[in-house]
Amino acid sequence: MAPTTNGTALSRVAVWYGDSALEARQQDLVLPTQSPISEYIGDVVDQLSDGDPITAPAGSQWTLARIGGPLKPHQSLHDARVTDGAVLELRAVKSTERYRKVTEDVIDAAATEAAAAGRPFDTHAARQAGLVGLAFGGVAVCAAQWLLWISNSYSWWWVLVGGIGAVVAFTGMWSASRRYESGDAATAWTVVWVAATAVVGQVIPISERTGSPGIPHVMVSAVGVAVGAVCALLLTRRHLAITTALSAVMAIVAVICAVAEYTNLRSSAIAAGVLIAGLIGLQNASAIASGLARITLPRVPADGEKMEVGGEIGEQELLTVRRRSRRAVQMTTGLVVAFAVTTAAAAVWTMDPHSYHYRIEMVIVSCVAFILIIWGRTMSNALQAFSMLTGAALVIVGSAARLLLAGQDGWKPVVVLAVVVGAIVVLVTIAVVVTPRGVNPRVARLIEIFGWMALVTVYPLAAWVTGIFAVLRDLRIG
């Protein structure tokens, strides 16, 4: 309580009022402590009205309430033991009403907030659930079409059915995107369309020697999926990052299939070449994305060199630059995800326990896992970082699985498990303990140097596994 100059005791309280027709409002007021509430409740109502008159229902009167229940109009704040800083509610009560507790208001408010925090299953949510069912059902139908094509001796009739399904999916995607302008429906039909474009691989004749689909079918299907994803992007203008990642992965798969089909290289040699390409792609993902987004990066001036300053950029040019920058960021994310997955899979496949280059491949796998961890830790984009860290985990677990499945006896499986467990413990400890505290700049610089040393080690060793050095050695000049 705070006495005024004339000796009247006052209490500082917060009074709020909420109604279904009006927005909730609250004011900090200074009220007489010893006077009955009925003497100044009218002034409180005027203060909270704020230009919008507040009228009590017929047969009701205004009073103040707290969590324990409404205060009787003839009571004073002192009689009700209301202290400074208390929160009171302006409420209209009937003379015959038993004073209900404000706890009910608290429960109602909590229920309202819970309903607002959770997403209701309304018409829009039901529609999205149906579209998810459409996407999964379409992919299942495409898979069933492939199984029926194989089980029916690769009949051309089933190829025709697959082509009709692709046309239907494209029509649905076009209608949802251009006619109805429904982004969710366009996304669902895009999934079906991309899965249906793999049917182009069935056009390739079956080899009489093998009597079953082979690498050419996978290669053509991968090309079809990549082209279908690009067509969907041009039509819908949605999901640029996902389309970039999918197209890049399918293009890499097509190149791998072509190399495997038309060369006599070992699988580990092909994987080593893909590993080199994946690491180069990770290093240059942002530059590739900038080129695809048609962003011209300025040349970095040398020390002391003067750069000519151009004129002011127009509003339209600024909008174009911003739009292309957003595209470049999304494409960078897609390329990083694609190259991280490619690099991890290639590193695992390079690890051939029965290869002549067994020890070299173990060094390659260890360096690749270390590189992905270092690069992933320095990424500012969470999705890019997660893709690299996931790739590192895939390299460690996949390589260990290949070593264990190679049928090794004795102490070697125990060593493999010990190395994997030790790596996991070290990584988890660093993530939990070191990351929140930060890293010493000298330690960070040392880790960066080790990362570059690992990268410099991987390139020549992977080239050695590909056999390029043997080819150069056997060259005869003249």
Image (spheres, rainbow, N blue to C red):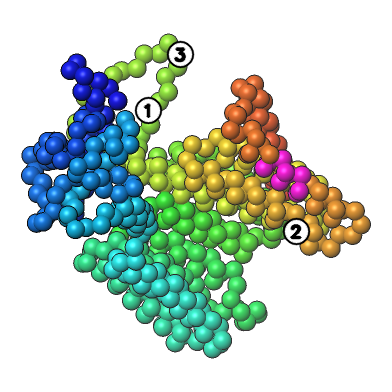
Quadrant where the image shows the N terminus? top left
- Does label 2 or label 1 sit earlier along the sequence? 1
Quick check: marks 3 and 2 in contact, CB under 8 Å? no
Separation of disc 2 and disc 1 at Cα? Answer: 46 Å
- Does label 1 or label 3 sit earlier along the sequence? 1
Comparing labels 2 and 1, the label whose residue is closer to the camera: 2
Separation of disc 3 and disc 2 at Cα? Answer: 51 Å
Image position, residue 352 (x, y; %): 76, 56
Q: Is residue 436 left or right of residue 27?
A: right
Comparing labels 3 and 2, the label whose residue is closer to the camera: 2
Residue at x-position 17% and y-position 55%:
94
Crowding near pointer 3: few (<14 within 10 Å), some, many (20+)? few
Residue at x-position 30% and y-position 66%:
122
Residue beneath label 1, please?
298
- Does label 3 or label 2 sit earlier along the sequence? 3
Indicate the secondary structure of the residue bearing disc 2.
helix
Indicate the secondary structure of the residue bearing disc 3.
loop
Q: Nearer the viewer, residue 83 or 118?
A: 83
Q: Which residues are magenta?
A: 420-428
Crowding near pointer 2: few (<14 within 10 Å), some, many (20+)? some
- Tell me where residue 178 sits by quadrant: bottom left
Q: Amino acid at mark 1?
A: Pro
Residue beneath label 2, please?
402
Q: Is residue 71 left or right of residue 412?
A: left
- Tell me where residue 87 sits by quadrant: top left
Task: Report the magenta stretch's main SS.
Answer: helix
Residue at x-position 49% and y-position 68%:
221
Q: Is residue 429 left or right of residue 105?
A: right
In the figure, 176 relative to 321: above or below?
Answer: below
- For residue 278, say whether it is visible: no
In the figure, 121 relative to 339: above or below?
Answer: below
* Residue 303 disc label: 3
